[in-house]
Image (cartoon, grey):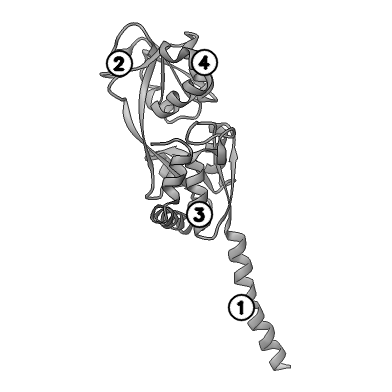
């Protein structure tokens, strides 16, 4: 009888942790239609999504990427109903509910305007009075809300914001230059010369895959992600991803 009990205990020790770990290795990360970084109409949901998936797979994770509107992706991950969020910029406020890994992608954010009157960027106030298009849920909403001479016009997608800028619906669009250039070439090729970025860039943004602190394993997942990125950089997969997506 004692021998049977010990056998059962050993079986629990051997098999239960494996089952638990396997369950923990399944994660869901959210992104939005923000081409070329992420997007439901892009191969592998975009190059940033593929970097994330390939890196985590190297560490034994099974990853599901879901593309939803940005504001929903942000709130869902804050609440812990998804494990990670693709394409998040760094803010101190977000560190309360997101954990930031070491890896990030740099992107230059510009104010875009209709081509014609040449103008350089100096300060936000120098643009006043103005209506500025931004992505709904962007941290720019909080940053600019106290500037009385600026009115914000949020939209659920960059594509819609570009369409509104071309149509003269607002004065400026604040967005990643990579994203605007990519979408213009793909969806509005005849309008490429109709808009222009203000120089210099408003800021150089850092784009992360962040992890929800509601997941008790967020630190381990983040560490594994960084280790996975290093692995795919060393074996050439990272450069292959960038080349496949036309990122230079």
- Residue 163 is marked as 4
- The answer to whether one can see residue 97 in this image is no
Residues under numbered marks 2 and 4 in contact, where contact means CB atoms less than 8 Å apart: no
Residues under numbered marks 2 and 3 in contact, where contact means CB atoms less than 8 Å apart: no
Residue under label 2 = 125
- Image label count: 4
Residues under numbered marks 4 and 1 in contact, where contact means CB atoms less than 8 Å apart: no
Tell me where residue 204 appears, x and y as whole percent: 32, 32
Q: State left or right for residue 149 relative to residue 123.
A: right
Residue under label 1 = 13
Residues under numbered marks 3 and 1 in contact, where contact means CB atoms less than 8 Å apart: no
Taking depth in this image into account, of 174 and 34 the one nearest to the observer is: 34
Tell me where residue 210 appears, x and y as whole percent: 46, 45
Residue under label 3 = 56
Give the mark, 1 or 2, whose residue is nearer the N terminus.
Answer: 1
Identify the residue at image location x=57%, y=59%.
25
Identify the residue at image location x=61%, y=70%.
18
Camera-nearest label, 2 or 4: 4
Disc 1 versus disc 2: distance between alpha carbons? 64 Å
Give the mark, 4 or 1, whose residue is nearer the N terminus.
Answer: 1
Crowd around label 4: few <14 · some 14–19 · many ≥20 (10 Å): some
Camera-nearest label, 4 or 1: 4
Q: Secondary structure at mark 3?
A: helix
Camera-nearest label, 2 or 3: 3
Disc 2 versus disc 4: distance between alpha carbons? 25 Å
């Amino acid at each position: 009888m004692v021998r049977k009990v010990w056998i059962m205990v050993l079986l629990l020790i051997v098999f239960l942790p494996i089952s638990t770990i396997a369950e923990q290795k399944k994660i869901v990360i959210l992104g939005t239609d923000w081409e070329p970084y992420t997007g439901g109409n892009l191969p592998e949901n975009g190059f940033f999504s593929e970097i994330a998936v390939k890196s985590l797979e190297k560490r034994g994770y099974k990853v599901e990427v879901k593309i939803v509107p940005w504001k929903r992706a942000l709130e869902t991950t804050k609440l812990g109903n998804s494990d990670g969020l693709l394409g998040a910029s760094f803010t101190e406020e977000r560190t309360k509910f997101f954990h930031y890994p070491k890896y990030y992608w740099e992107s230059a954010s510009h104010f875009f305007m209709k081509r014609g009157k040449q103008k350089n960027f100096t300060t936000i106030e120098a643009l006043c009075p103005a209506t500025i298009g931004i992505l709904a849920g962007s941290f720019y909403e909080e940053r600019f809300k106290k500037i009385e001479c600026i009115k914000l016009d949020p939209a659920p997608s960059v594509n819609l914001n570009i369409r509104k800028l071309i149509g003269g619906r607002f004065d400026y669009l604040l967005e990643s230059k990579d994203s605007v250039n990519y979408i213009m070439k793909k969806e509005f090729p005849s309008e490429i010369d109709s808009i222009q970025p203000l120089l210099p860039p408003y800021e150089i943004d850092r784009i992360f895959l962040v992890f929800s602190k509601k997941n008790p394993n967020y630190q381990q997942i983040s560490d594994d992600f960084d280790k996975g990125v290093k692995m795919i950089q060393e074996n050439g997969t990272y450069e292959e991803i960038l080349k496949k997506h036309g990122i230079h």
